[in-house]
């Protein structure tokens, strides 16, 4: 049916497995295919192959799905290893194939039931309602089915590390269904992989569809800062980044990451007083904001290492697995004239990030300071 799939675990009923998946991840639950087999002679159900779970989406509209299942179903019958009847030993016959795809807005699965005899039929299924006729979908309900298909397809591709496939689906999503909040969840992942054009398409769509929501504006600012930081754009673009962050703050005063963004723009420009002001403003509202603590600590490191140490320590308490805070503590301790304690912080950092050369530099500096 599809080349990439896995199966429902042994001794688990497919429908129970399905109910569990829907409860856990909703529209992101991968599609499931179950086949039903029977012996004509004995009039008995025969156990077939395990239910398949498909981490790919090959359709958009319900009609596309139906067409695809009909085509794939016929192929599957030709390829299938046919189970035998335990009573008479004869080959069993395929009764039908059920293909489950979730519709989160209607809170049911759309099920395409295909049989060699009767062709395709559209049903609905949910853990509480069971199988039944699928009600006709309104235009809006069809649109929301497409949204779920795109969301599921992009999530599945991301889970499989098929980055390019996920990017293509997300670009289609941003252009076809702009402003759906589900797309925002992919922005950290896209930015981390430097897929800025897809990220910008999502953020632009969101900002235009929901101008009152800070997230689209924030992300447009963040993407701009990232592009400048990687020297793909010049520093003259920082004014645009600032304008996006200001718009986010107009929607939500003290939006923590918009304030952090403004602080970073100010730092790049060398305006440390402005950077400090934005960060103090951020920490006044969210005192344990790890990135805010870190950025302010970096600014304080030169003139006020005691405060820098305290800020790095607070950040390390929030992010105990992140070596940067420990490395920062080491730098502050060194500046305060405590090289032995700086060594301890550096060793702890090295355990978390063994290959970070900046930690080696800190260790060497601390060792040299002990000898002096
Ligand atoms: Zn039989």
Image: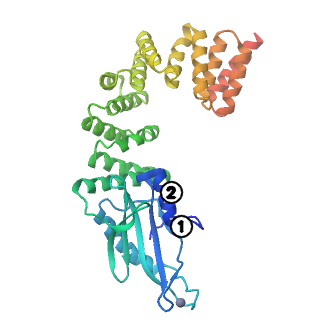
Count of labels shown? 2
The numbered disc on residue 13 is 1
- Give whichever of 287, 367 is nearer the camera: 287
Quadrant in which the C terminus is drawn: top right
Q: CA distance from mark 1 to mark 2?
A: 11 Å
From the viewer's perspective, is 65 left or right of 38? left
| Res. 274 mark | none
The residue at the point 31 percent across, 65 percent down is: 134
Q: How is the image coloured?
A: rainbow
Disc number for residue 20: 2
Towards the viewer: 197 or 48: 48
From what the image shows, is residue 95 above or below residue 343?
below
Q: Secondary structure at mark 1?
A: loop
* Residue found 53% across the figure and 25% down from its top: 290
Residue 267: horizontal and vertical position, in percent? 44, 17
Instruction: Name the side, left or right, on which 74 lies relative to 207.
Output: right
Tell which residue pokes out farthest to the left in this image.
139
Furthest toward the top, the residue is 303
Q: Is residue 44 above or below residue 244?
A: below
Pick whichever of labels 1 and 2 is earlier in the sequence: 1
Name the image quarter holding residue 174.
Answer: top left
Question: Which element is circle 2 on?
Answer: helix
Q: Is residue 188 visible?
A: yes
x and y, in percent, of residue 332 in the image: 62, 14
Q: In the image, is the residue at mark 1 within 8 Å of ligand 1 by its beta carbon?
A: no
């Amino acid at each position: 049916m599809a080349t990439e799939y896995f199966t429902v675990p042994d001794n688990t009923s497919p429908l129970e497995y399905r109910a569990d998946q829907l409860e856990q991840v909703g529209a992101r639950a991968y599609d499931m295919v179950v086949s039903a087999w029977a012996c004509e002679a004995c009039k008995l159900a025969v156990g077939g192959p395990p239910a398949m779970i498909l981490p790919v989406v090959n359709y958009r509209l319900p009609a596309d799905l139906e067409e695809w299942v009909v085509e794939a179903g016929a192929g599957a019958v030709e390829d299938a290893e046919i189970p035998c009847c335990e009573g008479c030993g004869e080959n069993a016959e395929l009764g039908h194939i059920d293909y489950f795809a979730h519709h989160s807005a209607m809170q049911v699965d759309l099920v395409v039931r295909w049989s060699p005899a009767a062709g395709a039929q559209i049903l609905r299924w949910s853990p509480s309602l069971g199988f039944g006729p699928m009600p006709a979908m309104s235009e809006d309900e069809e649109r929301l089915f497409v949204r779920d298909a795109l969301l599921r397809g992009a999530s599945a591709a991301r889970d499989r590390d098929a980055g390019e496939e996920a990017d293509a689906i997300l670009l289609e999503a941003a252009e076809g269904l702009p402003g759906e909040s589900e797309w925002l969840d992919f922005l950290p992942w896209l930015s981390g992989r430097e897929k800025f054009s897809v990220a910008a398409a999502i953020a632009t769509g969101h900002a235009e569809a929901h101008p009152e929501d800070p997230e689209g504006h924030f992300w447009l600012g963040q993407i701009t800062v990232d592009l400048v930081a990687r020297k793909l754009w010049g520093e003259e673009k920082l004014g645009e980044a600032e304008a996006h962050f200001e718009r986010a703050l107009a929607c939500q005063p003290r939006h923590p990451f918009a304030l952090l963004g403004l602080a970073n723009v100010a730092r790049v420009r060398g305006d440390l007083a402005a950077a400090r002001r934005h960060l103090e403003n951020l920490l006044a509202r969210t005192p344990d904001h790890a990135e805010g603590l870190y950025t302010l600590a970096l600014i304080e490191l030169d003139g006020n290492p005691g405060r820098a140490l305290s800020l790095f320590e607070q950040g390390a308490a929030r992010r105990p697995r992140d070596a940067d805070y420990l490395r920062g503590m080491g730098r502050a301790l060194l500046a305060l004239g405590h090289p032995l304690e700086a060594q301890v912080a550096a060793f702890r950092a090295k355990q978390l990030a063994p290959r970070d050369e900046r930690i080696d530099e800190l260790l060497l500096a601390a060792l040299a300071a002990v000898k002096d």
